[in-house]
Image (tube, grey):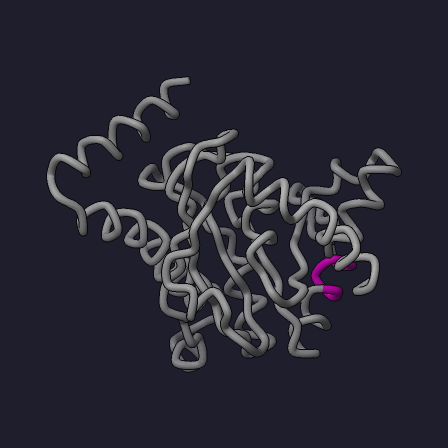
Amino acid sequence: MNFLYWIFWGLVYLPIRIFYPTKVINKKYFEYRGRAIFVCNHMSNMDIVLIKSHEHTMRYVLAKHTLFKNKFLAGIIRICGGIPINRQSVDISSIKTVLKLLKDNKQVIIFPEGTRRDNIDEAQDIKNGVAMFALKSSATIVPMALLYKPKFLRCNKILVGEPIDVTSFNEQGTNSEKYAKISEVVLQSIQNLRRNYIASFSPKKQLKIYKRLNKQISK
């Protein structure tokens, strides 16, 4: 798997970096070592491609099971570390696979919303799965946010936040209460990444960024 993975990315790496120029902000967090769950907002099918084109270690990623219906596409996704999951039911097999990977000190990327969204400031459903995986495996959660929806030949940013240690939640009530609190922290972290990044610019630059965001939402 790893051999085919690096062969594949060796072929597509340069075209992706040229045609979808993207910069990682807070690269030290992006390069976190050890068992971790990278959690990101979901804006397009190109999200995972942009993220994985910057990684220096193989990370697995949860992908909706319908993408695996085509055998050729399924093969590519699996080479890239894709794990099929059915979000409409309790997918025990996928859950066990993710937990085993994390306990083996691997890293997993999860888009908890499941469906694509253009605006991460809107109400979103951070699935309890992220919290459950983190607590059961003692994995660190690394929040991320794409600034814009990926677009051909348009610069973008992958914003990465400070890793979240979930061990402090172990003594906070029932499992459902822990999951809810962790989900709230993760959602807030993802939202703040984009808000704080935009706030770091001059009012004129902020206006330009928001115009681009509003334009992509209206399409």
Viewer-proximal residue, 89 or 13? 13
Viewer-proximal residue, 158 or 18? 18
Tell me the quarter of the picture where residue 94 sits.
Answer: bottom right
User: Does residue 82 appear anywhere in the picture?
Assistant: no
Numbered range of the magenta stretch: 92-97
Viewer-proximal residue, 57 or 129? 57
The structure residue drawn at horizontal position 19% and vertical position 38%, both measured from the top left corner, is: 206
Q: Residue furthest right?
A: 71
Q: Is residue 93 above or below residue 151?
A: below
- Left or right: 113 as drawn, with respect to 99: left
User: Does residue 90 appear anywhere in the picture?
Assistant: yes
Percent across and percent down for residue 6 are 75, 59
Q: Is residue 11 above or below residue 154?
A: below
The structure residue drawn at horizontal position 55% and vertical position 79%, both measured from the top left corner, is: 138
Q: Residue furthest top?
A: 219
Percent across and percent down for residue 92 are 74, 58
The structure residue drawn at horizontal position 54% and vertical position 34%, both measured from the top left corner, is: 44
Within the magenta stretch, is there residue 103? no
